[in-house]
Image: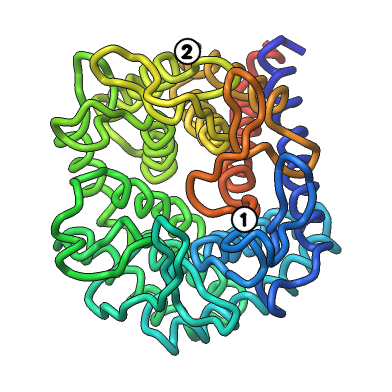
């Protein structure tokens, strides 16, 4: 077996084992307030957060995380159905309960929210830690809407097909909100049309929703992915800098979130499937290489780098950008055979499993001095979303590439 084939086989096996370990760990934990996933654990100490930990503790449920978790449960249940039937059954049992719970919240409020209190009322906490009820803003959509809509679509296909039109309509409302300036990125302040209008033109919302296109293709819903080509074109027109190969977070600003750029590349490859012009594929590979080579600064990828100097803008290297790099590089290599993509895939794989992986979960952030207690988004650990779904895509890419290598080996 060649060195390349050995790496691909080892990576595929490692990713299957890692995902199964995360899912079994998650399923073994009691539900949060019944049906919700409880991943409220410190990645440093491996101890549960308690009510003394405030917004990190079990009094607070994050809609963002639960939407991601539902997509992960349904997607992994489909993957493991022919490999580990008991695991798939357990995932489906939890998935159905979570689907019903998120559907009830969405029906009650018309939206999903970033954070709920113990009574499952939407709340917002300011920088001082004070908590108040979140404002109702029917015309405003958020990342929580995006993640819950994706989760409900994945769940409905598997558990409640009759509900699918309802969730597709919800999803398309999120798309329309992005394109009409009614999508608010910051959910830790009151929601309003004024706040949405005042925020910077970050490519994050289009990048996150682009991630739904690959899911829709796999679920047999490709007719609902037309928006994805518009999103890719918009990001490349307004955020891509040809001279550096990087994506600016906001046109005119200096910051580049290399992890988000790599996530964009992976989602774009996932959407284009076997299509995509040679120019598009070349630009995606350019972003892949430039973002990784600029951002890979030590234990992992810097949270953000300067477009001007290339220097990291803070000391943190979050865990999630490495599995997203694995997705992007593996899909690029499977499509083009790029040696550079294979190099990046190997480097990201080694960094993640050597520095971050703890057997079933990952450290949330490292600096050059080691693990740190830094929570960039939600304190709950990943419910099989960044790591699980990224590695799931890479498993498929590795297996496709191995299949293509067989005739060469036989020859």
Report whether 11 appears left or right of 255.
right
Q: Which residue is drawn at 40% across and 20% down?
A: 312
Query: Image height check: is 361 above or below 150?
Result: above
Q: Is mark 1 on a helix, strand or loop?
A: loop
The residue under label 2 is 340
Mark closer to the chain start, 1 or 2: 2
Q: Residue at x 45, y 67 (%)?
A: 130
Estimate the x, y position of residue 353 in percent, counting from the top left.
71, 27
The colour mode here is rainbow
Report whether 207 appears left or right of 315.
left
Depth check, front residue: 152 or 377: 377
Q: Residue at x 24, y 44 (%)?
A: 202
The residue under label 1 is 380
Q: Distance between the residues labelled 1 and 2?
A: 34 Å
Label placed on residue 330: none
Estimate the x, y position of residue 261 in percent, counting from the top left.
36, 33
Estimate the x, y position of residue 252 in percent, counting from the top left.
13, 31
CB atoms of marks 1 and 2 within 8 Å: no
Q: In which quarter of the image is the N terminus?
A: top right
Quadrant of res 295: top left
Residue 260 seen in the current view: yes
Mark 2 surroundings: few (<14), some (14-19) or many (≥20) residues within 10 A: some
Q: Residue at x 70, y 64 (%)?
A: 38
Depth check, front residue: 185 or 229: 185
Query: Image height check: is 230 above or below 302?
Result: below
Depth check, front residue: 224 or 122: 122
Residue 223 seen in the current view: no
Estimate the x, y position of residue 302 in percent, counting from the top left.
46, 25
Camera-near label (1 vs 2) is 1
Seen as rendered, the residue at the extreme bottom is 108
Q: Is mark 2 on a helix, strand or loop?
A: helix
């Amino acid at each position: 077996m060649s060195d390349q084939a050995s790496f691909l086989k080892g990576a595929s096996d490692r990713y299957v084992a890692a995902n199964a370990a995360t899912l079994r760990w998650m399923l073994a934990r009691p539900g949060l307030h019944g049906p919700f996933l409880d991943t409220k654990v410190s990645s440093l100490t491996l101890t549960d957060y308690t009510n003394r930990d405030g917004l990190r503790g079990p009094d607070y449920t994050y809609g963002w995380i639960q939407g991601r978790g539902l997509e992960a449960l349904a997607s992994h249940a489909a993957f493991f159905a022919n490999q580990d039937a008991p695991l798939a059954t357990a995932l489906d049992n939890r998935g159905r309960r979570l689907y019903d719970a998120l559907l009830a919240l969405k029906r009650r409020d018309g939206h999903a929210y970033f954070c709920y209190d113990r009574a499952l009322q939407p709340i917002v906490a300011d920088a001082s830690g004070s908590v108040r009820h979140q404002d109702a803003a029917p015309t405003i959509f958020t990342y929580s809407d995006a993640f819950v809509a994706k989760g409900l679509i994945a769940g409905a296909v598997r558990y409640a097909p009759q509900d699918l039109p309802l969730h597709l309509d919800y999803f398309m409302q999120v798309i329309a909100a992005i394109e009409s300036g009614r999508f608010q990125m910051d959910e830790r302040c009151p929601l309003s049309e004024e706040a949405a209008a005042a925020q910077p033109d970050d490519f994050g919302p289009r990048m996150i929703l682009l991630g739904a296109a690959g899911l829709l293709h796999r679920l047999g819903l490709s007719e609902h992915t037309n928006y994805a080509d518009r999103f890719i074109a918009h990001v490349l027109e307004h955020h891509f800098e040809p001279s550096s190969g990087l994506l600016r977070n906001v046109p005119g600003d200096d910051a580049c979130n290399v992890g988000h750029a790599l996530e964009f590349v992976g989602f774009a490859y996932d959407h284009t499937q076997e299509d995509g012009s040679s120019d598009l594929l070349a630009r995606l590979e350019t972003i892949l290489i430039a973002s990784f080579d600029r951002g890979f600064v030590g234990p992992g990828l810097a949270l953000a780098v300067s477009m001007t100097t290339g220097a990291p803008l803070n000391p943190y290297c979050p865990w999630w950008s490495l599995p997203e790099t694995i997705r992007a590089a593996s899909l690029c290599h499977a499509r083009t055979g790029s040696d550079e993509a294979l190099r990046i895939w190997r480097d990201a794989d080694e960094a993640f499993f050597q520095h971050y992986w703890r057997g079933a979960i990952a450290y949330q952030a490292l600096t050059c001095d080691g693990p740190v207690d830094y929570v960039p988004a939600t304190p709950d650990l990943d419910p099989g979303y960044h790591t699980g779904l990224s590695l799931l895509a890479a498993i498929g890419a590795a297996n496709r590439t191995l299949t293509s290598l067989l005739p060469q080996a036989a020859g």
